Image (cartoon, rainbow, N blue to C red):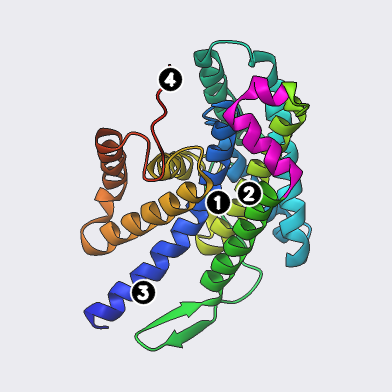
Amino acid sequence: MDTLSYFLEQMVNGLQLGAVYALIALGYTMVYGVIRLINFAHGDVFMVGAFTACTLISKWHCPIYLVFPLTMTVTAFLGFLIEKIAYKPLRAAPKISLLITAVGVSLFLEYFLSLNTLLTPNYIAFPRPFEITHYPLGLFSINNIQLSIFLITSLSLGLLYLLIYKTKYGRAMRALSHDREAASLMGVPVDGIISLTFIIGAALAGLGGILYGFAYPQINVFMGIMPGIKSFIAAVLGGIGIIHGAVIGGLIIGLSEVFVSAFLSSTLRDGVIFFILFLVLFLKPTGIFGKRIDKV
């Protein structure tokens, strides 16, 4: 394989990983945009999605067309519970209280599931519901797993765009992100819209968990930590609170991680991601698409 072919193959791999990061980053950026909260339990919702899909496929032998809606329903409900039980009572509390609670929810999900007799803290194999098929495209090839990830992610982003920019619920989300008090005075149901935001973000995280299991078929209860952190970095990189920024940030992080592993060293891939975060915070703290807002 010549250098150009190898480069193109790694680019496809990076876009595949970046698409998964983008789905997770959308949850971070939506929640932050609406209530200014970094939901650090979001990576663990992604993990629950992977385990739910694994159970549906391996234990209950669900067809693949049912795995997606059932998994996303489970994670959406989990996101709803997290918001109602952990975050809603602290909505008027200092931001540090919410941040500590988010970390606590993350640890609870990880260690509760690791102690559950139905699961294990060790890695388990994620069953792929179909065989991998490669399709040559000249200088490089693409497989059906990668095609599925690209198509499903693109469809999800398109539907999310329509929801946020073409429906009254999306209009309410955007109004709430600008000014919660004014939105409330104009009749926006604040509690309902916040819950809807958590539900949508958690459903996307569950979808990301399924696709991650297809692409990298080994999962464990702590698998959400690093993808969660990297997806948060992706959201910051694109401009946290900005939907298309989270997508672009996810793709950049995925490509950076894969290219560093392929051309430098796999031991450097995580360090490079955090170096990118340092550069963004140093050079443009608002992210690629973020804008500075001066308060008077």
Of marks 2 and 4, the one in the foreground:
4
Q: Residue at x 60, y 46 (%)?
A: 205
Q: CA distance from mark 2 to mark 1?
A: 6 Å
Label 2 sits on residue: 204
Q: Are marks 2 and 4 in contact (CB under 8 Å)?
A: no
Q: Are marks 1 and 4 in contact (CB under 8 Å)?
A: no
Q: Position of residue 109 (x, y in %)?
A: 61, 31
Label annotation for residue 23: 1
The residue type indicated by label 1 comes to Leu
The residue type indicated by label 3 comes to Glu
Of marks 1 and 4, the one in the foreground:
4
Label annotation for residue 295: 4
143 sits left or right of 192 in the view? left
* 197 in relation to 252, above or below: above
Q: Residue at x 52, y 31 (%)?
A: 40
Residue 212 placement: quadrant: bottom right
> Magenta segment range?
167-184
* Label 2 crowd bin: few (<14), some (14–19), many (20+), radius 10 Å: many
Pick whichever of labels 2 and 3 is earlier in the sequence. Answer: 3
* Label 4 crowd bin: few (<14), some (14–19), many (20+), radius 10 Å: few
